[in-house]
Image (spheres, rainbow, N blue to C red):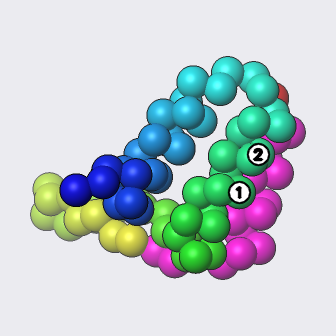
């Protein structure tokens, strides 16, 4: 097996690089763009629903390209 050929491996590596990029805005933006391309433009957001009888239910919510771009811009603006 070739690890880098595995999408999950590549995304995990991109996440680690993002976490290690500190305040480097350009690097973070490029890593976000690469992760977006790795997922073919499909981005998901996970939410925890605590409204059930003491059980947490994890949901995956599709995020539009506009929502992704807005969130990315907020990250860039925060740094």
Tag shown at residue 71: none
Taking depth in this image into account, of 61 and 18 the one nearest to the observer is: 18
Q: Secondary structure at mark 2?
A: helix
Q: Secondary structure at mark 1?
A: helix
Q: Residue at x 49, y 64 (%)?
A: 45
Residue 14 magenta-highlighted? no
Quadrant location, the N terminus: bottom left
Tag shown at residue 33: 1
- Mark 1 to mark 2: distance in Å? 6 Å
Q: Residue at x 83, y 37 (%)?
A: 26
Residue 14 percent across, percent down from the top left: 53, 44
Magenta segment, principal secondary structure? Answer: helix
Q: Is residue 32 above or below residue 18?
A: below
Residue 2 percent across, percent down from the top left: 30, 54
Mark 1, Cα crowd under 10 Å, few <14 / some 14-19 / many 20+, is some
The quarter holding residue 51 reads bottom left
Please give the residue where the numbered disc 2 appears in the rendered image: 29
In the picture provided, is 48 more to the left or to the right than 63?
left
Taking depth in this image into account, of 53 and 25 the one nearest to the observer is: 25
Q: Residue at x 74, y 47 (%)?
A: 30
Quick check: can you spot residue 63? no
Quadrant location, the C terminus: top right
Mark 2, Cα crowd under 10 Å, few <14 / some 14-19 / many 20+, is some
Which segment did they paint magenta?
A: 61-78
Q: Is residue 64 above or below residue 37?
A: below
Taking depth in this image into account, of 53 and 26 the one nearest to the observer is: 26
In the picture provided, is 18 more to the left or to the right than 74?
left
Residue 50 percent across, percent down from the top left: 29, 58
* Residues at discs 1 and 2 in contact (Cβ within 8 Å): yes
């Amino acid at each position: 097996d070739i690890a880098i050929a595995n999408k999950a491996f590549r995304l995990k590596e991109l996440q680690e690089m993002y976490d290690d990029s500190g305040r480097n805005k350009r690097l973070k933006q490029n890593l976000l763009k690469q992760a977006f391309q790795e997922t073919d433009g499909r981005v998901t957001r996970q939410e925890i629903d605590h409204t059930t009888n003491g059980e947490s239910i994890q949901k995956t919510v599709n995020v539009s390209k506009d929502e992704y771009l807005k969130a990315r811009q907020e990250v860039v603006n925060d740094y």
